[in-house]
Amino acid sequence: MSRNARPLRGAYTATPCRSCRTPKPARLYLCTQCWNALPDKARAALNIRDDQALRRLRELHAHIDSEQPLEELEITP
């Protein structure tokens, strides 16, 4: 589906997805398409809510900012 194929529904913010720059739902790190591109282990690690959650989010941001493919992301739990 192209980015302009249909109107977006739900609570979207003015902040775009850090990876693809399309609008993303509120309270999510990435848009659904980019989130689903992450390896299962990385998604599971990013879903853990503990005192290391911010460190894992920074790992995700550093990976994206270095322009590496999302499929290659490895997050330390």
Image: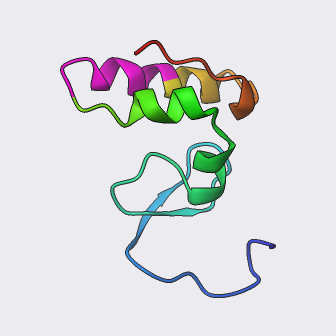
Q: Main secondary structure of the magenta part?
A: helix
Q: Residue at x 69, y 87 (%)?
A: 6
Q: Position of residue 10 (x, y in %)?
A: 42, 80
Q: Which residue lies furthest to the left in this view?
A: 51
Residue 37 in the figure: left or right of residue 61: right
Q: Position of residue 44 (x, y in %)?
A: 45, 33
Residue 34 in the figure: left or right of residue 15: right
Q: Which residue is drawn at 68% across and 50% down?
A: 20
> 42 and 6: which one is in front?
42
Q: Which residue is drawn at 24% across and 32% down?
A: 49
Q: Residue furthest bottom?
A: 7
Please say whether residue 10 is one of the residues in the magenta stretch.
Answer: no
- Where, quadrant-wise, is the N terminus in this rendering? bottom right
Against 73, residue 14 (above or below) is: below
- Where, quadrant-wise, is the C terminus in this rendering? top left
Against 51, residue 49 (above or below) is: below
Q: Which residue is drawn at 30% across and 24% down?
A: 54
Q: Where is residue 4 in the image (x, y as percent from the top left)?
A: 74, 79
Q: Residue furthest right?
A: 2
Q: How many marks?
A: 0
Which range of residues does the magenta coloring cover? Answer: 50-59
